[in-house]
Amino acid sequence: MVLALMVVLLSAGSAFADGPRSPLARCSALLANGRTLVDVAADHLLSDDLVRLVRLGMTGRLQVEVTVIRRQPFWFDAVVLEERRELVVTALAEGSGLLLDGTRVLRDVDRLELDRLALRPRPEVLPEEVDRYRVEVKLRFQVITAGSLRQVARWITSGDGEEQGAVSRRLLDAVASDLTREASARCDVELSQRPAARAP
């Protein structure tokens, strides 16, 4: 009986990540002083239901993957640089606002703008070859993981090893996947029209 209730609750949870608005990511990339400056924004990546879970005290994790790619005629494109970061989304101690990575308040959860990324590909991107480069961005926002769902299952079925084993790992993985929002974008690297300050 407990297991049946668990399955129903987890299956119902798959509706959290669904909604009328699909996530949409955008990016722009400029070449300045040997650096590739990447700006990333996303609309509707933080769905209302997942934001509600964060405000209830859960921690959201935003995974950012940025790849600089060089086009190679008559051959496979080459990955020049890969940058991966994980940012934490938490609720403010007071009020209903959210905090990104403990430093920036998210005023508008429907439109997420990340801090500019200053990348230094090697070999360096030359201004005369800038049209051969592009940037691909992948965003993944997750509040509940398969591991946390398995922990919940252990709490609910505590003391009954047989029933614990009956909770399907595949089911929990599927529900966690449904509770994840993803978006991707790509943009060509362009030459900056004005000099940028060098990074320290």
Image (cartoon, rainbow, N blue to C red):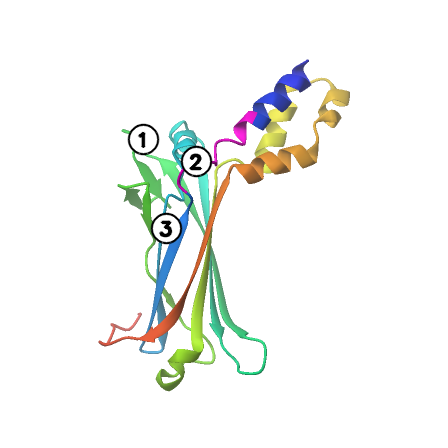
Which residue is outermost to the front?
20
Residue sitting nearer the eye, 146 or 86? 146
- For the question of whether residue 155 can be seen, the reply is no
Instruction: Indicate the position of residue 97 as horizontal and vertical percent values.
Output: 29, 34
Query: Does the magenta-highlighted stretch encompass residue 41?
Result: no
Q: Position of residue 7 (x, y in %)?
A: 63, 23
Residue holding disc 2:
19
Distance between the alpha carbons at the discs numbered 2 and 1:
28 Å
Cα separation between marks 1 and 3: 25 Å
Which numbered disc flags the more N-terminal residue, 1 or 3?
3
Task: Give the CA distance from mark 2 to mark 3.
Answer: 16 Å
Q: Residue visible at 42% across and 44% down?
A: 22
Amino acid carrying label 1: it is Ala
The segment highlighted magenta reads: 12-21
Q: Secondary structure at mark 2?
A: loop
Q: Earlier in the sequence, mark 2 or mark 3?
A: 2
Above or below for 1 versus 17: above
Hey, what amino acid is under mark 3? Answer: Ala
> Residue 57 appears in which quarter of the rendering?
top left
The answer to whether residue 91 is left or right of residue 67 is left
Q: Amino acid at mark 2?
A: Gly
| Image x and y of residue 160, in percent | 73, 18
Q: Which residue is mark 3?
A: 42
Please identify the quadrant where the N terminus is shown. top right
Q: Compared to 75, does 171 lie above or below?
A: above
Query: Which residue carries the number 1 mark?
Result: 93
Number of other residues with Cα within 10 Å of mark 2, as a class: few under 14, some 14 to 19, many 20 or more: few
**At numbered mark 3, what does the secondary structure look like: helix, strand or loop?**
strand
